[in-house]
Image (tube, rainbow, N blue to C red):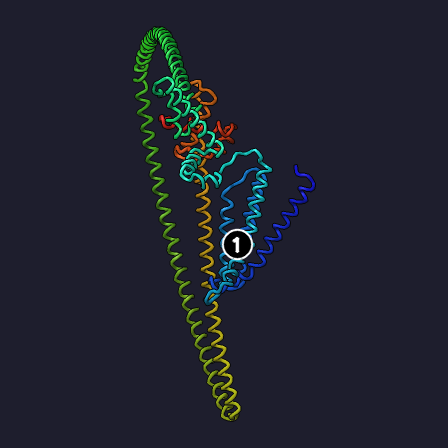
Amino acid sequence: MLSRPQRVAASAVALAALALALTGLYLSFNNVAKFAHEELGFHSLEHGQLFIGGVDLGILTLIAVDLLLAWLGRPVTWIRYPVWLLTAATMALNSASAAPTGGWEPLDYVAVAAHAVVPVLFIAIVEIGRYVIDQVVRPDRERTSIPVHRWLLAPVSTARLYRRMRLWSLTYEEIVRRDADLRGYRIWLERLCAAEKRKPTADELLPITLAPHGYTVTEALALPGIQAGEAEERRRAAEEREREAEVARAEADATAKVRKAEARKTIRIAEIAAQAQVEEAERAAEDQRTAAERAAAHHGELIETAEMAEARARAAKAEREEAEERARQAEAEAAEEVARRETALLETAKAAEARARAAKAAREEAEEKEKEARALAAADTARREAALIETADAAEARKRAAEADRRAAEERARKAEADQLAARREAEARRIRTEAIEAERRAIEAAAETERRAAETRRAIAEIEARAAEAEDAARLTPRQRAVRRLARIALRETDGDLSRIPLERITGEFGVASSTASEYRSEAHELLASGYRP
């Protein structure tokens, strides 16, 4: 925790940085907005102001997010690069707005460079604040970047060091420690072989051989023992499976013998049941034969009675057919009578309708003639009145009325065109709304399909994990071996087996181990995938 004076000092620095940021924004706002409007093609000065306001707001937002993540102990390094890029763009626009239109004088270079002073100061203060927050939140963290002086003093070896850091996701302190261990081991091995006057064995050369693959000296020296232990464990597992298979075969033989005995017993029971069914069928056949003989004796008595019943049935059928024929004739006569009556009524209705149409036509003709007579009378009266009152003023009035009528007709035509345009726009708006609704529907269907596929993928992953867990239980793997296989399955599922694309921080968070152990997990998973492991 900071003391009170330290908190006061930190608050003062934060206020000063904020004041510096506001000063830079104030100085660059109008210049860049005017330059964007006049030189960059923005339609208006307001658009230019919105542009520079958005850029400045983006810079401040990214800086706030960067500082917040550093405060929470979860810094993201790449956030600073967009901040630098946007700040450089603001500096370039400011400098361009101050550039002269003619020749350059020495003072012009000073004026252009002056526009970059405040942004550079602000970025420097932000970077210092980020570093201070990171040191306060994580004081004992290892360095993840290579110091600049190493690049200057040993650029070639530093490039190789940087390649291994990024290839195996190692920190700077860890890769330096590994190099020191490897150099020390190499020197010790040379001295040992020189003292014993022999060449190093293959096992002794393992740290040098496996160093390009991310192994430490300790891991490389322990690898033969680990492999021998795993081979022994696999041999014991194979023997255990063989014993279990023998037990299973013995159990299967015993079960087969029991089933054979049960089958013989079942066959005997079926034979006894079949014999009983045969005897029962013979008795039933004898009973049926006796009943048939009695039925044959009784059949002769019933023949005469059957013939009499059949004669009565034929007579009843003839009477029923005769009654049906009389009913059909009556229906036909009734239908003819109804048709005659409908025909008569239809002719009467047509005649009445014809008379009504004739009367209507005569009445309309009389009304038309009367209207024509009135119109002729009115026209004659109007001509007479016009002849009596025709003057120059009346002619001028008619001319003005005709002009007003023409203007009204033009206004009605313009209104009709406007109505047609509005109708077309309304139809286009309805079409766009319909297309938007259809697009939204398709998007919803696509989202549902995506969710269904994601659910199927999750179910398949769960089944693979379950089968892998069963296989690991059967193989009696240690927790470390289970974790390595789980990491290999994650790499196969998410990065197509490329473990270098899985961050070391995710492995530490996923399995709850230290950074060095996570690196070992990744190396072991890489070896496991290289050996052909597939769940």
> What is the quadrant of residue 260 in the picture?
top left
Towards the viewer: 43 or 342:
43
Q: Is residue 249 above or below residue 206?
A: above
Q: Secondary structure at mark 1?
A: helix
- Please give the name of the residue rendered at 32% of the width and 31% of the height, measured from the top-left corner: 314
- Please give the name of the residue rendered at 47% of the width and 88% of the height, measured from the top-left corner: 380
- Please give the name of the residue rendered at 58% of the width and 48% of the height, measured from the top-left corner: 125
Q: Position of residue 405 (x, y in %)?
A: 49, 80
Q: Position of residue 387 (x, y in %)?
A: 49, 92
Few, some or many residues within 10 Å of mark 1 (<14, 14–19, 20+): some
Q: Is residue 47 above or below residue 61?
A: below
Towards the viewer: 480 or 358:
480
Q: Position of residue 479 (x, y in %)?
A: 48, 22
Quarter of the figure that contains the N terminus: top right
Query: In the picture provided, is 8 more to the left or to the right than 163?
Result: right
Towards the viewer: 116 or 154:
154
Camera sees residue 468? no
Quarter of the figure that contains the C terminus: top left
User: Can you name the residue that lies furthest to the right here?
Assistant: 4
Q: Amino acid at mark 1?
A: Val
Which residue has dot 1 on it? 55
> What is the quadrant of residue 56 in the picture?
bottom right
Query: In the picture provided, is 169 more to the left or to the right than 271?
Result: right
Number of on-image labels: 1
Q: Position of residue 36 (x, y in %)?
A: 50, 61
Towards the viewer: 220 or 360:
220
Camera sees residue 508? yes
